Image (cartoon, rainbow, N blue to C red):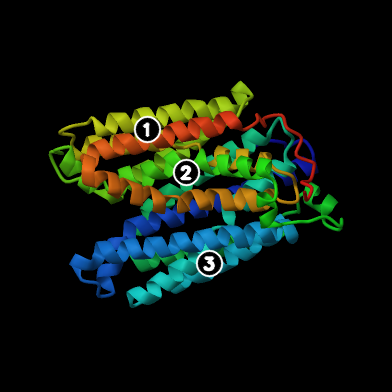
């Protein structure tokens, strides 16, 4: 994989693999819920006319869990260690998934998805932090690429498992979590964290991000570069049946198919962005390229008048590749901050980006009332892309940055 010549190298490889499996679980869970949402709600007695509303409510509840979990696990990762977070988050997630397979009413379903969201929130951020602090600065990007590659198999697993039934899909998610927990028994803590563990410095202080204007700006810019990603996934893909009507699609567009192919594209885009970052020796250039590519992919989609369902899944795949900078985007956030708040940043940033979907949805709906479905999407994508490009321009290049330092309280 990355290093194999020594025992230490093999340990690093194993650590990268184990951290990568957290992203596998992340993609598996989000994709499985998108696939089984309708059949699962119908089977527990939700009326067909209420499926959309109840489903959206459960998704919002899970997103709220991700927001809270991002803060919880991020802070714990800086206070107690990255490995403890990887254990705690996967235990909570696994229990929630087994429970999800046993639900019989929508209220319980929503509560358990909220708990699963909290558990899932710690996976990617803690894993990326651990990989970034363990690998050399020249090879961190390869670690990100492996994370994205393993995530691809999470999408494949979700598609295959969901065919056997929605309860079975959740049970398998729980089993995957337990297997991942067992694998993590042999992992080791980040050397950078261990070097500051007993030092009398502020660790995991979320409010430290707000005590310095420079830190706060940097933190906000890290969040904003991910905004176009969730507009594509949460609006353009999720609302594809409505966009299909506005685009005079020749047959009904299926949001589940769109989410499926979009996530497969995201995983492949993650591999491409990681390798390109290593080849160009730059995170920022890659982000510029993928931000522009995501705007182009959205433009192509919104101009596809009269498209077929087959053309739609192809476009969803293309848009997924274009916004497949997710893993490297989290890496950029991790590399911007010191060891004592790195886990807090790397875990909260991706989950706050997911939370941006709420104001993004509100803005889109407000625009739609005046400009219609297609023009509102043009406006939103243009605004979010400009904001993201500006945010990237304000961040420093971190490809060769030494991460062994701490942030001081102002």
- How far across and down, in percent of the image, does residue 135 sit? 72, 39
Query: SS for tag 2?
Result: helix
Q: Quadrant of the N terminus?
A: top right
Residue 400 location, quadrant: top right
Instruction: Identify whether 321 is placed above or below 251.
Output: above
| Residue drawn at point x = 58 percent, y = 43 percent | 330
Instruction: Identify whether 183 is placed above or below 146.
Output: below
Q: Residues within 10 Å of mark 1 (few under 14, many from 20)?
A: some
Compare marks 2 and 1 and give the one earlier in the sequence.
Answer: 2
Q: Nearer the viewer, mark 2 or mark 1?
A: 1
Q: Find the distance from the CA under tag 2 to the CA under tag 1.
A: 28 Å
Foreground residue among 45 and 370: 370
Q: Confirm or deny contact between disc 2 and disc 1 (CB under 8 A).
A: no
Q: Which of marks 3 and 1 is in front?
A: 1
> Which label was assigned to residue 382?
1
Instruction: Identify whether 273 is placed above or below 186.
Output: above
195 on left or right of 37: right
Residue 41 location, quadrant: bottom left
Mark 3 = which residue?
94
Query: SS for tag 1?
Result: helix
Res. 174 visible in picture? yes
405 on left or right of 374: right
- How far across and down, in percent of the image, does residue 355 sit? 46, 53
Q: Confirm or deny contact between disc 2 and disc 3 (CB under 8 A).
A: no
Residue 394 location, quadrant: top right
Q: How crowded is mark 3: few (under 14 residues within 10 Å), some or many (20 or more)?
A: many
- How far across and down, in percent of the image, does residue 302 sit? 26, 33
Compare marks 2 and 3 and give the one earlier in the sequence.
Answer: 3
Foreground residue among 256 and 11: 256
| Residue drawn at point x = 43 percent, y = 33 percent | 385
Mark 2 = which residue?
152
């Amino acid at each position: 994989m990355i290093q194999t010549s020594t025992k230490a190298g093999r340990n690093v490889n194993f650590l990268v693999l184990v951290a990568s499996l957290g992203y596998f679980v992340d993609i598996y869970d989000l994709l499985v819920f998108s696939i089984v949402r309708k059949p699962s709600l119908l089977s527990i007695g939700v009326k067909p006319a209420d499926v959309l509303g109840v489903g959206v409510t459960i998704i919002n509840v899970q997103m709220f869990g991700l927001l809270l979990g991002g803060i919880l696990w991020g802070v714990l990762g800086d206070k107690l260690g990255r490995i403890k977070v990887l254990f705690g988050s996967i235990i909570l997630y696994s229990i929630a998934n087994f429970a999800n397979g046993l639900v019989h009413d929508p209220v319980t379903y929503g509560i358990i998805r909220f708990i699963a969201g909290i558990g899932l929130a710690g996976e990617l951020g803690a894993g990326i932090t651990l990989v970034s602090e363990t690998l050399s600065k020249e090879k961190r990007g390869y670690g990100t690429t492996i994370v994205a590659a393993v995530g691809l198999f999470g999408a494949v697993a979700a598609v295959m498992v969901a065919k056997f039934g929605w309860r079975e899909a959740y049970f398998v998610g729980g089993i995957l979590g337990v297997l991942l927990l067992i694998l993590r028994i042999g992992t080791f803590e980040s050397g950078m964290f261990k070097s500051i563990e007993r030092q009398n410095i502020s660790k995991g202080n979320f409010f430290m991000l707000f005590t310095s204007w420079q830190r706060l700006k940097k933190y906000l810019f890290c969040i904003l570069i991910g905004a176009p990603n969730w507009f594509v996934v949460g609006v353009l893909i999720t609302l594809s049946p409505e966009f299909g009507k506005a685009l005079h699609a020749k047959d009904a567009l299926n949001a589940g198919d769109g989410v499926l192919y979009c996530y497969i594209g995201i995983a492949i885009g993650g591999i491409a962005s990681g390798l390109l970052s290593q080849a160009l020796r730059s995170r920022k250039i890659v982000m510029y390229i993928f931000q522009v590519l995501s705007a182009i992919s959205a433009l192509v989609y919104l101009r596809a008048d009269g498209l077929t369902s087959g053309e739609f899944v192809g476009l969803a795949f293309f848009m997924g590749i274009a916004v497949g900078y997710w893993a490297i985007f989290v890496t950029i956030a991790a590399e911007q901050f010191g060891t004592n708040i790195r886990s807090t940043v790397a875990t909260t940033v991706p989950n706050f980006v997911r939370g941006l979907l709420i104001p993004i949805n509100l803005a889109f709906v407000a625009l739609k009332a005046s400009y219609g479905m297609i023009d509102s999407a043009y406006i939103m994508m243009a605004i979010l892309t400009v904001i993201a490009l500006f945010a990237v321009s304000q961040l420093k290049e971190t490809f060769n940055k030494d991460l062994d330092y701490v942030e001081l309280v102002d």
